[in-house]
Image: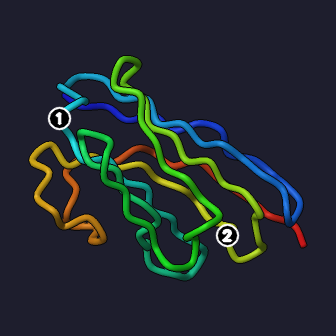
Amino acid sequence: QVRLVESGGGLVQAGGSLRLSCAASGGPFSTYAMGWFRQAPGKEREFVAVVRWRGGYMHYADSVKGRFTISRDNTKNTMYLQMNSLKAEDTAVYYCAADPRDRGLWTLVTGYDYWGQGTQVTVSS
């Protein structure tokens, strides 16, 4: 059974930085496409970033491009999201997700089979 556990969330001032981690277990992590999503109160869950299993391809939502960096360390079964220049509108619960088949549906919630429990990120203005 694949299990994903996020960590690293917290409270930060606008303009600050946070680094989220997603630890994976229970599967061949290195072959999965891995993504980050976020959900603000009263809003739908939205795509943030994805990294394919080889780690050589990344894709970002326009809203975070240039500020966030996704990466993965397959030797540690861990994915990261470095978030810089944080804004109040980045406040949300952040979720990591895994697609074992790497189907290419990277921006869709339905494109992932496994989800973590989420970690809260709050940016104060």
- Of residues 118 and 75, the one drawn nearer to the viewer in this rendering: 75
Looking at numbered disc 1 in the image, what kind of residue is underneath it?
Thr
- Of residues 111 and 56, the one drawn nearer to the viewer in this rendering: 56
Reading the image, the residue beneath label 1 is 31
Spot occupied by residue 54 in the image (x, y as percentages of width and height): 24, 39
Corner quadrant of residue 28: top left
Reading the image, the residue beneath label 2 is 90
Q: Residues within 10 Å of mark 1 (few under 14, many from 20)?
A: some
Corner quadrant of residue 100: top left
Looking at numbered disc 2 in the image, what kind of residue is underneath it?
Asp
- Of residues 121 and 100, the one drawn nearer to the viewer in this rendering: 100
In the rendered view, tell whether residue 35 sits above or below residue 62.
above
SS assignment at label 2: helix
Spot occupied by residue 7 in the image (x, y as percentages of width and height): 59, 36
Looking at the image, do the residues carrying marks 2 and 1 touch, with CB atoms under 8 Å apart? Answer: no
In the rendered view, tell whether residue 29 sits above or below residue 102.
above
Quadrant for the C terminus in the image: bottom right
Q: CA distance from mark 2 to mark 1?
A: 29 Å
The coloring applied to the image is rainbow
Say which residue appears at 27% left-offset and 71% top-offset.
108
Say which residue appears at 66% left-offset and 42% top-offset.
19
Query: Extreme front residue here?
Result: 56
